Amino acid sequence: MKLIGITGKTGTGKSTIATTLAQKLDGQYVDIDKIGHQATSDPIIAKKLCNVFGNELLDSNGIINRKKLGNIVFSDTDKMQILTDITWEYMEQELDRILLQKQQYFIFDWALLPKVKFWDMCNIKILVTSDDTVRKERILERDHISLEYLEKRESATLDYSKLAFDFIFDNDYTNESIDTFIETTYKNIMNITNGNN
């Protein structure tokens, strides 16, 4: 089993890289953000979050509104840590369960991946970067959020040390550059897997 970790700021296109590479490797793509969303939908976790942050987190259907939650935690590191403490056990157990499956390659995709135990388990670590101005424009269009909300969300992102990565891709969002990076990375992974590197 080989674990490939792909990280980078939101909007860099890391999920495109991760899903494309997973297809190329015939591996399992894992969107850790999605597991985080599942965690906040869990009734027990939702109740804990409401006990801490208030019932105003709930929408009209009694489900956690993630934008409301984001407005609370993104600009406050202490509150972000509380959110992590409440949701991480669920997420960790789900990721441990996934890794028990019979699969040669797992591709983990998450902006906060370097902060958790699975980062040290990664055989290959990939950072996706891009021009900040273009990246933010893409996020605003994709997520239909305000610039103010985006800036709050940005304050919770990590600073990545490029020395920690095996491969770094500066994404210009063209199919040609993405295809080239995927092909080159695939060949390198095959070399590493086969013990030729």
Image (cartoon, rainbow, N blue to C red):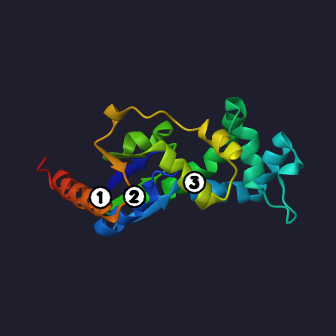
Q: Vertically, is 33 above or below 26?
A: above
Q: Residues within 10 Å of mark 3 (few under 14, many from 20)?
A: some
Please tell me whether mark 1 sits on a helix, a strand or a loop.
helix
Tell me how far mark 1 sits from mark 2, CA to CA: 7 Å
Tell me how far mark 3 sits from mark 1, CA to CA: 20 Å
Q: Amino acid at mark 2?
A: Tyr
Q: Residue at x 40, y 50 (%)?
A: 6
Q: Vertically, is 28 above or below 5?
A: below
Q: Are marks 1 and 2 in contact (CB under 8 Å)?
A: yes
Which quadrant: the N terminus? bottom left
**Which residue, given by chain and number where applicable, does mark 1 sit on?**
177
Residue 195 showing in the rendered view: yes
Q: Nearer the viewer, residue 69 or 153?
A: 153
Relative image position of residue 120 (x, y in whole percent): 39, 39
Horizontal arrangement in the rendering, residue 134 relative to residue 63 (left or right): left
**Which residue, given by chain and number where applicable, does mark 2 sit on?**
173
Q: Residues within 10 Å of mark 2 (few under 14, many from 20)?
A: some
Q: Residues within 10 Å of mark 1 (few under 14, many from 20)?
A: some
Corner quadrant of residue 149: top right
Please tell me whether mark 3 sits on a helix, a strand or a loop.
helix
Q: Vertically, is 167 above or below 21?
A: above
Q: Are marks 3 and 1 in contact (CB under 8 Å)?
A: no
Residue 101 showing in the rendered view: no
Question: Along the polypeptide, which appears first: circle 2 or circle 3?
Answer: 3
Q: Residue furthest left?
A: 196
Tell me how far mark 2 sits from mark 3, CA to CA: 13 Å
Q: Amino acid at mark 1?
A: Ser
Corner quadrant of residue 71: top right
Horizontal arrangement in the rendering, residue 42 relative to residue 185 (left or right): right
**Which residue, given by chain and number where applicable, does mark 3 sit on?**
139
